[in-house]
Every structure is written in structure tokens, then in C-alpha cells.
Image (spheres, grey):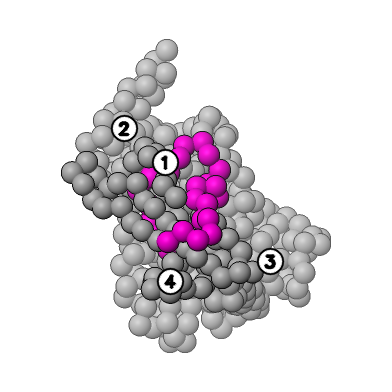
Amino acid sequence: MPATAWPAKRCHVRIRDLNWQTPGHRELEHVHLTAMPPGRPLEMIFNFPLGVRETCGQEDACGPSPIHLGVTPPRNIHLPRAEYIDWKSLLKVGVMDFITSTAILPLLCGCVGIFSLFKLLQRLRMKAYLRNAVVVITGATSGLGRECAKVFYAAGARLVLCGRNREALDELTRELAASQAAKVQTHSPYTVTFDLTDPGTIVAATAEILQCFGHVDVLINNAGVSYRGAIVDTTMDVDKRVMETNYFGPIALTKALLPSMIQRRQGHVVAISSIQGKISLPFRSAYAASKHATQAFFDCLRAEVEQCGIEVTVISPSYIHTSLSLNAVTADGSRYGVMDEKTAQGRSPVEVARDVLAAVGKRKKDVILADLLPSLAVYLRTLAPGLFFSLMASRARKERKSKTC
């Protein structure tokens, strides 16, 4: 039966229910056509009448001639029908069948199960790592240090709280003892009063801690001071003061406790740095310089003590809603006394303290706790320094203009 001369378009037709063979003819299983009727039911493309023999048109100069197909089926055999194959739908069905097959679905379930088990083991390991560990926290009386004291206390650590104000340390100790947040056995915190800018008190504090506990498992260098001012107006005394508190004090305490850690071949040193240890902002020169120095020192320390089994973690938060800017020193050494807009919009110290706990428990090496823009700025400084410097210069102009208005 001649087929209608439809517009030329490549298609595939599959013959179903045709598993028999006529004498002298090869078995018809797949037929490939070069034409199909638009807008007609695909299963009605061909009708195979009884008693018609199979023939095929010949190619001519204008392309293939119409195709003639015919078969002589035995009785009680259903007439075959042609069906158009939608390869896109077939591919989708095949993919779904592949995913839900016995090979892939158990694999996916297994991966999810392994990941969940890994996270569970990680949490259990973190809890075991911190429970009963001797944790020294400097700058524990306010801000992030105070919140770190709370979360490490709730984790079951034996705390050594350090600060310059004895009354504030005692108040924090009473607050921790009265809290009900801990789900494990807790220990009464031990307090040590000393000033990071005084090397003599650092040596005495170290001796007192080691005499009381015998060792230190985790040292969290948190104490610090911020700075606001123009470089041209800042005295060297202010630069030295900021460096003493943010850099020389923490490394002096770290060096004092390091020999006992090396002897035990166990210990963890944590430096609470800043995003400004990665990038520098205008009118923060002394603070940014101290944090860059902190980053560099503890990066070197990490490499040197790794073979001794000692962990080193540097944590670089962005703006935190604390009193850091209020207590910042200015170019002439006076107290800044202003809550910056960015600081007021910063992250809660409670959230950051939890991130610090997780970073210590997971023994991470370098952590940035910042939103998208500050995090991108870190990479922009390396990948497109010219653009970064232009943005910082623009920021400096805007900040200088806002101060003069």
C-alpha cells in the first residue's frame, strides 16, 4: 500500500506484535522512514493489509520514492502497528528507571546513610574532645569571650577564665554555675587575673595554670582591643599599645604554654583574629596590622608544631555586635565610645561562639566567619587587587567625608 508523500522529516518507527516471518522475506522488526504525517495519530501511519507482498521504492535523483510495505501474516495474528518513538521522553524514562533500579537507588541511600553517620560520629567526637578538657580563654569577661565561656562550659570543659577585672571574672563564674544549659557534667571555672600587655603577669599566670591543672588542652587567645583613626594622626604609642594587646600578648602566652603541649604531644592553640587579618580597611591601620601579624604568626606555628600533634586554629570573624568599637582606642589614645553602624548590625556573639566551639571541636585550621561580601573581598584582594584597592580608596573618601560633615 503506497504511503502518502509527507514532508521529509527524519523519524523512527517501531513495528510491534510482528515476530513472524513470511516465506522468502526477512523478518520485519524495525522500519526507518524519512517521512511522517503532521497532525495525524502516529499509530495510524501504516496499515498492513492482508495478502500484500513486501516491496520497496528505489532511490531517484529527487530522493527516496514512497515506501511500499506489505506482509502476508498467518491467521490469528494481530495486525502490526507502527509507533513513533519520542526519544526525549524515552531518555527521561530510561534515566528514572536507571535511578530507581537496584543498582542506583541503594547506592544513593547508602551515600545518605554514610553522610549522616559521618556527621553523627563527628558530633560525638567533638563532644568527647571537649569534655573534661582544660580550656583557657583570655578576654573572658565580655563580648565574644564571655559567650565562648558559656558554650565551652556547657560542653563540659574545665575552664580557666582570664581577664584584667577580678570582679567581672567572679560574676561570670557565678552566672555559669547558675546556668542550666549544660547537658553534661560541668566543672567549676578557675579564674586568673592578668594583663596581656604586662609580660611579667603572663609568666606568673602560666605558672599558676600549670601548677593547678598540670597541662592545657585548648588555649583560646580571644582578648583584644580595636582602633579607629587616621594614620597621619596616630601616635606610635597607640600603635604599640594595640600591638601589645592583640599580638605580643597572645604570642607571649602561647609561647609560655607551648613547651608543656610539646612535651605531652597534645594541645590546641586557637587565635581569634579578624577578617581584617585577611584584608585591611581604611582608618583601622593599627588593628589590621595586629591581626595580619596574628594570622602570619599562627600560620607559621601550625606548620612548625604539626609533627608534635598540636592543632592550630585561626578564626577570622567579621563584625560582631559587641562593645569592641565602644572600647576602641583612637589616634590620640582616648576611648572611641561610639557603636559603629556595621558593628551594631553585626552577628550575635552567641552565634559566633557556637561557630568557634564547632571549629575547635572539628579541629579546623583556618575559618572565616563572615557574610558574603566580606568573604568575596578576601578573594578579590588576591584575584583583582587593583579593583580592591579602588574600592578601599572610595570607602576612605566616603568615611572621611562623613566625619567632616
What number is the disc on residue 153? 3
Horizontally, residue 85 falls left or right of residue 389, namely: right
Q: Amino acid at mark 1?
A: Thr
Is residue 19 placed above or below 318 in the rendered structure? below
Q: Residues within 10 Å of mark 2 (few under 14, many from 20)?
A: some
**Which residue, given by chain and number where applicable, does mark 1 sit on?**
4
Label 4: which residue? Answer: 27
Image point 76% across, 66% down: which residue?
A: 182
Name the N-terminal-most of marks 1 and 2: 1
At mark 4, the secondary structure is loop
Query: Which class describes the residues within 10 Å of circle 1: few (<14), some (14-19), or many (20+)?
Result: few
Amino acid on which the number 4 mark rests in the picture: Glu
From the top left corner, tell me how far across and down residue 94 is, in percent. Answer: 52, 63
- Dot 2: element: helix
As measured in the structure, the alpha-carbon distance from the residue carrying label 3 to the one carrying label 4 is 82 Å
Residue 364 position in % (x across, y down): 47, 67
Q: Residue at x 51, y 36 (%)?
A: 39
Q: Tell me which secondary structure the magenta stretch mostly adopts.
A: loop
Which label sits in the foreground, 1 or 2? 1
Q: Which residue is mark 2?
A: 392
Relative to 164, 404 lies left or right: left
- 305 and 362: which is toward the camera: 362
Would you call the spot at circle 3 few (<14 residues within 10 Å), some (14-19), or many (20 or more)? many
Kind of residue at disc 3: Tyr
Give SS at disc 1: loop
Q: Residue furthest top?
A: 405
Residue 193, how many percent across, how many down? 58, 61
Q: CA distance from mark 2 to mark 4?
A: 78 Å
Pinpoint residue 353: horizontal percent, then vertical percent.
60, 56
User: Which portion, as a residue range, is magenta?
Assistant: 30-53
Quarter of the image holding residue 253?
A: bottom left
